[in-house]
Amino acid sequence: MDKKIYSITELNQLLKMFIEENPYTQGIWITGEISNLKIYQMGKQTYFTLSDGNANINCVMFANSAEKLKFKPENGAKVMAMGKVGFYNKKGSINFQVFFMSKDGLGDQGLAFEKLKKKLDAEGIFAPELKQPIPRYPKKVGLITAFNSAAMWDFITITRKSVPGIKFYVIPATMQGLTSANSVCEALDIANEYQRLDVVVVLRGGGSAEDLASFNNEELVRKIAFSKTPLISAIGHEIDYTLIDLASDLRAPTPTAAAHLIVQSYIKAQADIPVFLDNIYRIVKQKYDEHLNELIQNTEQISETTEYILKENIQKIESLIKRVELANPLHKLRQGFSICRLEKTKAILKSVNEINEGESLQTDMIDGHFISKVTKVLKE
Amino acid sequence: MSVKTNVAKLEDILQNLEQEDTNIDNAVSQYKEAIDIAAKTMTELKKLEKNITQLKKESNTICEYSVDIN
């Protein structure tokens, strides 16, 4: 078997996939000391290194996260940062993209989040073995969301634009506040029990950490992890990580991204079908050409052989006809020979011993016969 | 009617006709039979020849159509 040789681009794509699609590297907290701090005013990106004294990692904070910082980062400052590990294809380098950073460590809510995350992780609630594959071509999509919300309509509009045939089953739920976790649990029960859905999407637009807190509820996280129907979580913006994102079968960074995930296979198929058809046409045409050539050759061969046999038979019959003509017994009569018979019995006479004097004889000639009487028999 | 059988029959009759002691009446009747068989066989062969020509023409047309479709 030939060894697969990867290009650097292919290798880096693989590494990016392994790193960025791994739940253990996404939505995690790290702590360390800032060094090499560079703030680019133009793009408003902040670059720095975080170090714990033994190891370093390069970090980046983009403008939308940096502008929410409640302190000014400085070299030497000890911080806690929440974000995801990213892989930069072009340079083949790893960095940590920071979504949130705190100088004072985690607050009570953060500590509770981490404690619950650790506990559920230890129980295997986020284990890859629990993840169900998302159907490539879902036809019935359940939406657990606030009815008539912007997120719901964004999702439906984007999905319908690409694939008009998809059916949506909206199961309304409270997506914020104290009753939210319970409401989403009930909606998920309905989705799993009463609808034969291909996939369920839990949808909510962006909000503050407090608004999204219900999606870290332990009961809800467990229910999501064991959902019978494959489930996509699409809560808030890309920088918002909740525990249901870790428990779901697939996390979409935003409701819009979830819509694109649902239709991506359909869009790919729309592009692939003409290529498949073209391939099928080429294969069929190749087979057709092969068979056609074979047919033409066979037809010619059969035709030649049959004609040969026929001609041979005609020649044989013609030659036999000539021989039969030559053997025509009446030829002898034309040459002057005649046939002599007893007139009474018509028996052919071959010897004078068969004749008696006085008997009537019939003599056949080419153009008729005559009767004569034997007057004398002479033997030689 | 088999050409092969008729050829064999004709060859038998010829052998009889070519024998000197064959009764002339039998010879005449066999001669008539031989002529009849030969004529019928030839008619059949001509019919086959016509059919083969027609089939050849049709197969050529099919091949031409196939090339066109291609």
Image (cartoon, rainbow, N blue to C red):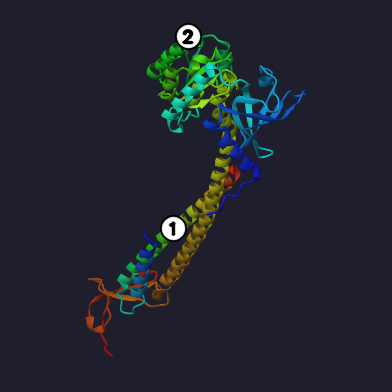
Residue tagged by mark 2? A178
Foreground residue among A128 and B2: A128
Residue shown at 34%/69% (left/top)? B28
Q: In the rendered view, does A3 fall on the left or right side of A36?
A: left
Q: Nearer the viewer, mark 1 or mark 2?
A: 2
What residue type is disc 1 on? Thr
Name the mark on residue B35: none
When asked about the image quadrant of residue A25, the answer is top right
Q: Is residue B20 above or below residue A254?
A: below
Residue shown at 58%/21% (left/top)? A105
Residue shown at 70%/28% (left/top)? A75
What residue type is disc 2 on? Leu
When asked about the image quadrant of residue B12, the answer is bottom left
State the image coordinates of residue A179 (x, y, percent, origin top left).
Answer: 46, 9
Residue tagged by mark 1? B43
Quadrant in which the C terminus of chain A is drawn? bottom left
Foreground residue among A322 and A329: A322
Q: Chain of mark 1?
A: B
Foreground residue among A239 and A169: A239
Q: In the rendered view, does B20 fall on the left or right side of A306?
A: left
Label 2 packing within 10 angstroms: few (<14), some (14-19), many (20+): few
Circle 1 SS class: helix
Q: In this view of the protein, can residue A341 be seen by the observer? A: yes
